[in-house]
Amino acid sequence: MEIKYKFKLPEEQDKYRIHNKAIDMYLFIMDLQTYLRDRYKYDETLIDKEPVKLMEEIRETFYQYLNERNINLDIMG
C-alpha cells in the first residue's frame, strides 16, 4: 500500500506543517500522559502541594515537552 499526500504551497502551508508534525504531536501527548500518570501514581508530595504551584509545574512541563518536540502551537491556528 502506498499513500501520497499533496499540498498546494504556499496556500496550504499550515496544513503541510501540521501533517509533518503529526508524529511529534502524538509523541508529545504520550509524553505528557506518562508524566501526569507518574505524578499521580508515584509523587508522594502531590497531596501537600498548593493547587497553583502544582498547575505551574504542569504548565512548565507542558511547554518543556512542546519545545523538546519543536512543536509550535501557532501553526494550529
Image (spheres, rainbow, N blue to C red):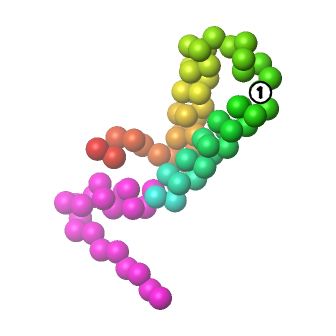
Q: Residue at x 60, y 31 (%)?
A: 61
Label 1 environment density (alpha carbons within 10 Å; few <14, some 14–19, many ≥20)? few
Instruction: Judge whether 77 appears above or below 59 on screen.
Output: below
Taking the image as shown, residue 47 lies to the left or right of residue 6, namely right
Of 55 and 14, the residue lying toward us: 55
Of 59 and 38, the residue lying toward us: 38
Q: Which residue is mark 1?
A: 43
Q: Residue at x 43, y 61 (%)?
A: 20
Q: Residue at x 39, y 41 (%)?
A: 73
Taking the image as shown, residue 73 lies to the left or right of residue 38, namely left
- Give percent across and percent down for residue 8: 22, 68
> Which kind of residue does numbered mark 1 sit on?
Asp
Hey, which quadrant is residue 64 in on the image? top right
- Give percent across and percent down for residue 36: 65, 36
Instruction: Judge whether 38 appears above or below 31 on screen.
Output: above
Quarter placement of the C terminus: top left
Of 69 and 53, the residue lying toward us: 53
Q: Secondary structure at mark 1?
A: loop
- Point out the stretch of residues depicted in magenta: 1-21
- Give percent across and percent down for residue 15: 30, 59
Of 3 and 8, the residue lying toward us: 3
Hey, which quadrant is residue 57 in on the image? top right
In the picture as drawn, the residue positioned furthest to the bottom comes out as: 1
Task: Check if residue 28 falls in the magenta segment.
Answer: no
Task: Check if residue 6 falls in the magenta segment.
Answer: yes
- Give percent across and percent down for residue 19: 39, 61
